[in-house]
Amino acid sequence: MYQTARRACVLADPQFENRTFDEITNAWLLKFRQSGERHGNCTNTINIRLRCIRAVFNYARKMEYTTAYPFSREKIKNTDIIHRDLTNEQIINLITAPVPPELHTSITACRLIFFLIGINCKDFHSLKPSDIQHGRVDYIRAKTHKAYSIKIQPEAAAILKANTGCLRAFLPCERYSDHRDYLKRLNSDLAAFCKHIKIPARTTNWLRHSWATLAWRIGIPIDTISLALGHSFGLNITNGYIQKDLSAADAANRKVLDYIYQTTPKQPLATPSSP
């Protein structure tokens, strides 16, 4: 995030590399925000980068490198995000409709992402066969650097079994060195599949948002949703004392999938990957 914020600073101000703390004024911050808007960044994205700059100032003041602080009058307030939720019918189409052979690997991966509670694409990109143990997917979240575990529900197990029982059919980290390149490929193929099944084009981010919204609609407590998504919840100090019981997250995922199918869970169509 800090590297991204730094690039945004240079984009807004070509002389940024030579600026002193005293030169980063309220007027400079306004120009930074305007630059972000010109380049199509939403308010929340710009605010994340401003918080990175503010954190650098706080550290610099703590270390007595500077007394300058342009943030005393700079309010950083997020706006509500645009919700990216699929309808039940759209989700059931995405996870059961026959897939053209050329889209098989990507769409199967998208289905697995949804069945794994909308796992973040960067985390999915990094998964290895060894991360599957005792019916669970265990990994370290890239965003929080904390260990997390997701139970493999029957729908996900069917995909893994159809693809030689492991993640070797996907292993995007072996073909894409950068998760951003992999995300572009997934989203491109997902858009093509959406067109194929005649629904509006969607991205993988909709899978995670849709899981959370569906969980909320069927009455799953927000703390359980937060836990299932791998977000922090409660007071930070208390959070550090608690050993998380992921059985609640496992049950929540099962309820969401049952709600989608409305009946006894069906196995999604998953054909073996091509050699």
Image: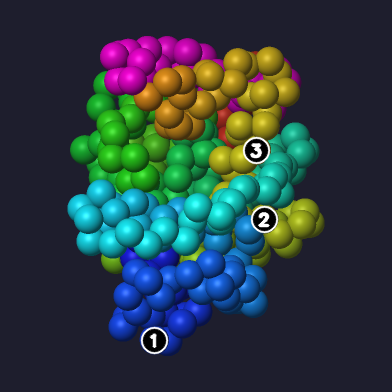
Q: Quadrant of residue 30?
A: bottom right
Estimate the spatial distance between the alpha carbons at disc 2 and disc 3, rounded to whole Å.
11 Å
Label 1 is placed on what type of residue? Answer: Gln
In the picture, the disc for residue 190 is: none
Can you identify the residue that label 1 sits on? 15
- Crowding around mark 2 (Cα neighbors within 10 Å: few <14, some 14 to 19, many 20+) is some
The reply to whether callout 1 and callout 3 are in contact (CB within 8 Å) is no
Mark positioned earlier in the residue sequence (1 or 2) = 1
Estimate the spatial distance between the alpha carbons at disc 1 and disc 2, rounded to whole Å.
39 Å
- Per the rendered image, the range of residues in magenta is 237-263
Q: Report if residue 244 is visible in the image.
A: no
In the picture, the disc for residue 210 is: 3
For residue 104: magenta? no
Can you identify the residue that label 2 sits on? 202
Name the element at disc 2. Answer: loop
Q: Nearer the viewer, mark 1 or mark 3?
A: 1
- Residue in the foreground of this view, choosing between 98 and 218: 218
* Residue at the farthest front position: 67
For residue 248: magenta? yes
Magenta residues, dominant SS class = helix
- Crowding around mark 3 (Cα neighbors within 10 Å: few <14, some 14 to 19, many 20+) is many
